[in-house]
Amino acid sequence: MKLFAGIQNYFRESYAELIQKVTWPTWNELQGSAITVMVASVVIAIIVLVMDLVFKYGMNFVYSIFS
């Protein structure tokens, strides 16, 4: 029975922590964070695209030299 008491205590303490100790972001903070993540994702995608294109055309140039 100690096992079930321990599990019950774990869930009780987890719930109390979520309700009393966790600081949830405001709606404006959440929107700002979401916009930041979206912009960063687009910037990183563009950087990867440019790197891919440079590598593609660079390798095509190298292959054209040796063929």
Image: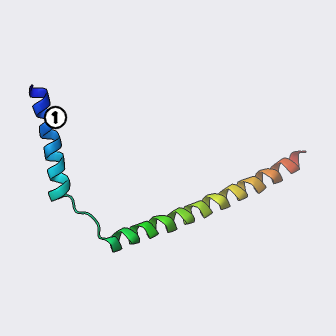
| In the image, residue 10 above or below residue 34 | above
- Does residue 66 appear to the left or right of 38 in the view shown? right
| Image quarter in which the C terminus is found | top right
- Does residue 55 appear to the left or right of 48 in the view shown? right
- Residue ranking furthest to the bottom: 28
Q: Nearer the viewer, residue 29 or 7?
A: 7
| Residue shown at 33% from the left, 71% from the top | 27
Residue 47: x percent and y percent?
60, 62
| Image quarter in which the N terminus is found | top left
| In the image, residue 40 above or below residue 28 | above
| Residue shown at 82% from the left, 54% from the top | 61
Task: Give the image's coloring scheme.
Answer: rainbow
Q: Amino acid at mark 1?
A: Ile
Q: Secondary structure at mark 1?
A: helix
| Residue shown at 45% from the left, 70% from the top | 35
Q: How many marks overall?
A: 1
Pointer 1 residue: 7
| In the image, residue 55 above or below residue 37 | above
- Does residue 62 appear to the left or right of 16 in the view shown? right
Q: Nearer the viewer, residue 63 or 38?
A: 38
Q: Nearer the viewer, residue 31 or 4?
A: 4
Residue 6: x percent and y percent?
12, 33
Q: Quadrant of residue 51?
A: bottom right
- Residue ranking furthest to the top: 1
| In the image, residue 32 above or below residue 1 | below
Residue 25: x percent and y percent?
29, 66
- Does residue 5 appear to the left or right of 58 in the view shown? left
